[in-house]
Image: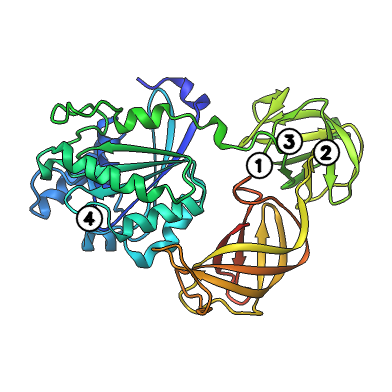
Amino acid sequence: MITDNIYNQELLRFTTAGSVDDGKSTLIGRLLYDSKSIFQDQMEAIEATSARRGEEGVNLALLTDGLRSEREQGITIDVAYRYFATPKRKFIIADTPGHIQYTRNMVTGASTANVALILVDARKGVIEQTRRHAIIASLLQIPHLVLCVNKMDLVNWDQDTYEKIREEFEGWASKLDIRDLHFIPMSALTGDNVVDRSPNMDWFQGSTLLHYLENVHIGSDYNLIDVRFPVQFVIRPYNDNFHDYRGYAGRIAGGILKKGDEIMLLPSGFTSRISKIDTMDGELDEAYPPMSVTVLLEDDLDLSRGDMIVRPNNIPETSQDLEAMLCWFDSAKPLQLRGKYTIRHTTQEARCIIKEIRYKLDINTLHRELGDKTIRMNDIARVSIRTTKPLFVDAYNRNRITGSIILIDEATNNTVAAGMIR
């Protein structure tokens, strides 16, 4: 039974990826169903839909394929976010499409994930899409990757088939920047090794998927060394009882903030000390990522949205020239060399120009295509950007928050790219 402690539980975000029909939506449906996270009316609705379509049993994929067009085609198109909880942890799932043309959706869904689940059909083994999604997970610096070898029921639970896939992927993935790699043979359709251990694969001694998700250590996924606190909002209550109150609200992007700590303000370079750390639940002695807090300072200094609180001896790079890997989202027009865009970084916003397209990355081989500078939707490229004002940045592999940007088309206000600062 889930108690009130759920509100104090650690939150884990994970994303699913894989080729079409590898069973991503079915796997999530199985997790929700076997962990008792489905309401009765939801269950009745998918039972009715399954019966109407003449399917045997209940199609658990219908729990995540929520768009009408997805249900009609039997595929996942958009990123579907689902929430569930167990007595140990809270979870947010991003179910991303398997089609090549939806690479941008995977980048969106995976950008904040602690864990990436990449599904492989045991009958097909490691294919191009498997490698593609693993490369994206590596580029996005997702700390933990799990290769779920699904549909083991269709290969008669054969251990040799699983071991062959594991060895092939492990050897290939050694070229990538993957910190933690895990393998689980399973059947999402029957539930084997998803929530409960499989009686059909007693040769596998590892954990079930849910046990892994409940117990994988994610505390060190955040940068707890470099203090980074982008100011989102200045709080000045219009109340005589709080006339001396001046707080700076935002989400901690890195490091640990403690009452009494000496800090530096960017861009001014002034220093002060933290006098108080406020939250909706009361005052704290210390705070850390990804908590949202209000920081009060001992000195009356001028701070506004886009400024950043850091440590005096540990500051980010302040620069108007950025090198970044961009994933292009826009289907209407390609990336424009010398094109002008709005750039957003943490709580800062500026205008920018694309100075140079250095190369396009072949997402299947990791080769750099120096001659092809046409960057269309779903392409990933390394670019050089010049901004109209300095930004306070870290390399993406050091801090995924202060190392990420988005570009916005000034004419349409559409988000046209997401980028990782190198």
Q: Earlier in the sequence, mark 2 or mark 1?
A: 1
Question: Which label number is shown at residue 21?
Answer: 4
Q: Earlier in the sequence, mark 4 or mark 2?
A: 4
Marks 2 and 1, how far apart at CA = 17 Å
The amino acid type found where label 2 is placed reads Asn
Answer whether labels 1 and 3 touch (C-beta < 8 Å).
no
Q: Nearer the viewer, residue 5 or 45?
A: 5
Q: Quadrant of the N terminus?
A: top left
Q: Nearer the viewer, residue 109 or 154?
A: 154
Marks 4 and 2, how far apart at CA = 51 Å
Question: Which label number is shown at residue 294?
Answer: 3
Query: Could you say where residue 351 lies in the image, as x and y percent from the top left?
Result: 72, 69
Q: Is residue 381 above or below residue 28?
A: below
- Badge 1 local density, few (<14 within 10 Å), some, or many (20+)? many
The amino acid type found where label 4 is placed reads Asp
Q: Nearer the viewer, residue 4 or 151?
A: 151
Q: Tag 2's secondary structure?
A: loop
Please state which of the two labelled residues, at mark 1 or mark 3, is closer to the viewer. Answer: 1
Please state which of the two labelled residues, at mark 3 or mark 2, is closer to the viewer. Answer: 2
The amino acid type found where label 3 is placed reads Thr
Please state which of the two labelled residues, at mark 2 or mark 1, is closer to the viewer. Answer: 2
For label 2, the residue is 313
Q: Earlier in the sequence, mark 1 or mark 3?
A: 1
Q: Earlier in the sequence, mark 4 or mark 1?
A: 4
Query: Could you say where residue 360 lies in the image, as x and y percent from the top left?
Result: 51, 71
Marks 1 and 3, how far apart at CA = 13 Å
Question: Which label number is shown at residue 253?
Answer: 1
